[in-house]
Image (cartoon, rainbow, N blue to C red):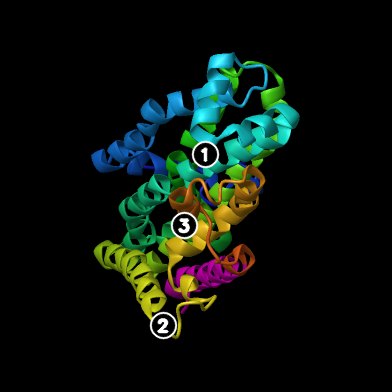
Amino acid sequence: MPLFQIGYRRYEGERTSHLMRWWPITRTGLTIAWRSKLLRRLVYVSFLPFLYFGWVFFLIGRATDPSADPEINLIIADLLGPQLLDQLQNDPAVIRSAVWAIVFAMFGTHIQLLLGALVAATVGPPLIANDMRSRSFLIYFGRPVSRLDYVIGKAGVLAALLAAVTLMPSLLLYVFSILFSPSIDTLVQTAPIAGTMVLASLGAVLPGALIVLALSSLTRQPRFATAAWIALCTFGPLMHTILQETRELKDNGWSFLLSLPHSIRALQLGLYDVAGRVEVLGLQGDMDGLVEGLTSSNSPGRAAAWLATVSVLALLLVLRRVEAPTRI
């Protein structure tokens, strides 16, 4: 049978932009990951707090309106004292932004971090480990895809799913609160909080995604990477707690860096400026239990520097491990 036009021919189809060559990897990874029933349940569970937090944010939005009904003002006076009510009447912008920041910090630094860790343990370990086992790098790099494109594509899978359980529920609650707020002033005065939500979510998503990818690149068995991630999220907080119980090391300013969850939470609370907001509201003596849970001596700047360092090292490790199977 004769052959027609033997040899190389120019590709005449539509070319993908070099800046978007990572997107097919991310899209395919998201499609495969979403087949997991456990992942879908975790994402659905992350939106369940909307059912019982929604009315709380609705009441917060109504209560922080200086033109609210007298009955609501009486409720505020009974719960938080007449001093806060007077501050709300005199300077509603400062009080409203402070209250909203504290409430969103409460929502975003507890259950969402736990769900994010579970999603990372479910989705992250197979992303590179399976490629290491099947040696599929030749398929990726046989196309015009660089190591950085590959890593960005894999990180995009995990980052998108982590954002789905950390950022999206908070933004949904914020939109819900704005829609049912009494005036447009609420949006104007609380708009910076939406930006803080995005930064706080990035502070958790980027380090978590890169660290899990680094663990995944170190093994060909996803279960080993899962075990390493669970150990990191378990023994780090345990070591921090043990050091805090030691008299000589109780007041040190570095033990929280041993714990990834504590470091991320310190960064997020610093971004929300919870300590400053509490001081503005004058809640130190009235709500000691709540204040103690939201304020700490952990340095947000130190946490940010440490998380940035760990993220860069994790990225360099992933790039190194991805290149290794292609060396001759």
Would you say residue 66 is visible in this rendering? yes
Q: Is residue 324 magenta?
A: yes
Alpha carbon distance from label 2 to label 3: 35 Å
Residue 247 shows which numbered tag? Answer: 2
* Residue sitting nearer the eye, 58 or 137: 58
Q: Nearer the viewer, mark 1 or mark 2?
A: 2
Q: Secondary structure at mark 2?
A: loop
Amino acid type, mark 2: Arg
| Count of picture labels | 3
Classify residue 122 as left or right of residue 142: left
Amino acid type, mark 1: Val
Say few, some or many: other residues with alpha carbon within 10 Å of mark 2 (under 14 / 14 to 19 / 20 or more): few
Q: Please provide percent x and percent y for residue 249.
A: 45, 82
Where does the magenta region start and end? Answer: 305-328
Q: Please say if 263 is above or below 175.
A: below
Q: Residue at x 58, y 15 (%)?
A: 70
Q: Secondary structure at mark 1?
A: helix
Q: Which residue is mark 1?
A: 103
Q: Please say if 154 is above or below 74.
A: below
Viewport quadrant of the N terminus: top left
Of callouts 2 and 3, the N-terminal one:
3
Alpha carbon distance from label 1 to label 2: 33 Å
Q: Nearer the viewer, mark 2 or mark 3?
A: 2
Amino acid type, mark 3: Ala
Q: Please provide percent x and percent y for residue 41.
A: 28, 37
Q: Which residue is mark 3?
A: 209
Classify residue 296 as left or right of residue 121: right
